[in-house]
Image (cartoon, rainbow, N blue to C red):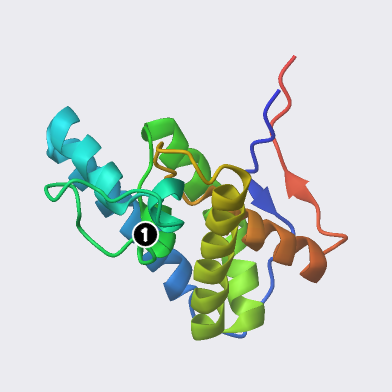
Amino acid sequence: MPFVPLDDDTHGPLTIEKPWLTWALMAACFIAFWVQVALGQEGGLDLIYGLGVIPKTIVGQAVLAPQLYLVDPLVTLVTYIFLHGDLMHLAGNLLYLWVFGDNVEDAMGHWRFLVFFLLCGALSALVHVMAGPASEAPLIGASGAISGVLGAYLLLHPRAKVLIPIYF
């Protein structure tokens, strides 16, 4: 049974006025997914290859075809975060960011949270590259960055209660 968070009990006055950055990151993921869908299957796949992390290109063992080359392979360590494989992949990542991101952003402040989020995503992609440097399959999704947010949330709120549905 998957762990599906709906809310947490850390509601109190935020030190930041609103979690703008959490909302902006969610919007960026949603917009990127909408663009993927709007491009159709072939165009969306080209976008995934152009902006996803391909380990073999990161380590310099391969070069993308010119029509797929959108950004430098090192830039894909950030761009891959905003692409997702399907609607459930997107929804799961956005749900976790919605429930936990505001608390971490509140603790860190807007700009430190942005750097933290992108750094967690980039570091998780680099671990993926180290695990399979010869891979030609693109890595996409915000799961690595979200994992960093979850880790920070656990350190900041170790006793928080998280509301999850229980099915019988």
Q: Closer to the camera, 140 or 9?
A: 140
SS category of the residue bearing label 1: helix
Disc 1 designates what residue? 76
Position of 104 relative to 29 (above/below): below
What residue lies at 64% left-to-right and 54% top-to-bottom?
Answer: 147
Outermost residue, top side: 168
Residue 64 lies left or right of residue 119; in this view the side is left
What residue lies at 15% left-to-right and 31% top-to-bottom?
Answer: 42
Image quadrant holding the N terminus, namely top right
- Image quadrant of residue 123? bottom right
- Image quadrant of residue 13? bottom right
Residue 165 lies left or right of residue 77; in this view the side is right
Q: Where is residue 50 in the image (x, y as percent from the top left)?
A: 25, 50
Q: Which amino acid does label 1 sit on?
A: Thr
- Image quadrant of residue 78? bottom left
Residue 71 lies left or right of residue 26; in this view the side is left
Q: Where is residue 14 in the image (x, y as percent from the top left)?
A: 62, 79
Q: Position of residue 142 (x, y in %)?
A: 48, 52
Q: Closer to the camera, 14 or 138?
A: 138
Image quadrant holding the C terminus, namely top right
